[in-house]
Image (cartoon, grey):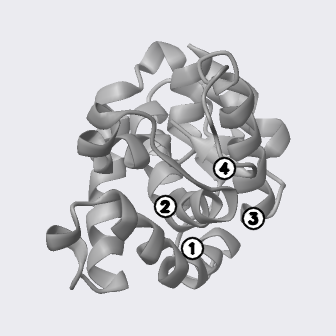
Amino acid sequence: MIKKSILGLSAIALVQATSVQAMQKGDTCMPREDFESIVVAILPAAVNGVQDKCSSVLPTDSALLTTDVSKGSVIKMASDAAWPKAAGSVRKLFDEDMAENATPEVLQMFGDLMIGSMIKQEVKTEDCQDIENIYAPIAVLPPENLAAFTSALLVLGMKDKQKGKDIPEGSVCF
């Protein structure tokens, strides 16, 4: 359940979806700052996806439902600023032929559609209150801090799985 909650709040779904081939070969790792740029970049789509999924079960004044992800909001402006760096990180996850010529704008549209769709499939309405309970206290964080928190949780959650593996220092692996 916690994994689904983190999934709904972060870029884990996008990272997992865009790295299927790499994951079949083994662990996929990237520098933490690259992962965090992806989290910031897709945060509006992630929040919007959870809002759509949870709007029927959460109170209208919940942190999730009152988070503004529209154009001009802090989250959307941070996302727009993060996409050029995030696009380079996303390209590393894709098959090079597929993403090499994709502009940040194309990758942004693809990422927004993908994360929204995946959240609708992965997050269950019975998880919404748990997601709200996790999100509410951290909703006030700037998007960059929320991304750093998300990557720290991912690193912490993967420690046991990665014991004995040669993981580059400062990397996020999934």
| Mark whose residue sits in front, 2 or 4 | 4
Q: How many angstroms separate mark 2 from mark 4 (CA)?
A: 19 Å
Q: Are marks 1 and 2 in contact (CB under 8 Å)?
A: yes
Q: Is residue 36 above or below residue 149?
A: below
| Residue type indicated by callout 4 | Ser
| Residue type indicated by callout 2 | Ile
Q: Is residue 21 left or right of residue 74?
A: left
Q: How many angstroms separate mark 1 from mark 2 (CA)?
A: 7 Å
Question: Badge 1 is on which residue?
Answer: 79
| Residue type indicated by callout 1 | Ser
The dot on residue 144 is 3
Q: Is residue 14 left or right of residue 107?
A: right
| Mark whose residue sits in front, 4 or 3 | 4
Residue 163 is situated, as x and y percent measured from the top left of the image, at 67, 20
- Element type at mark 2: helix
Question: Badge 2 is on which residue?
Answer: 42
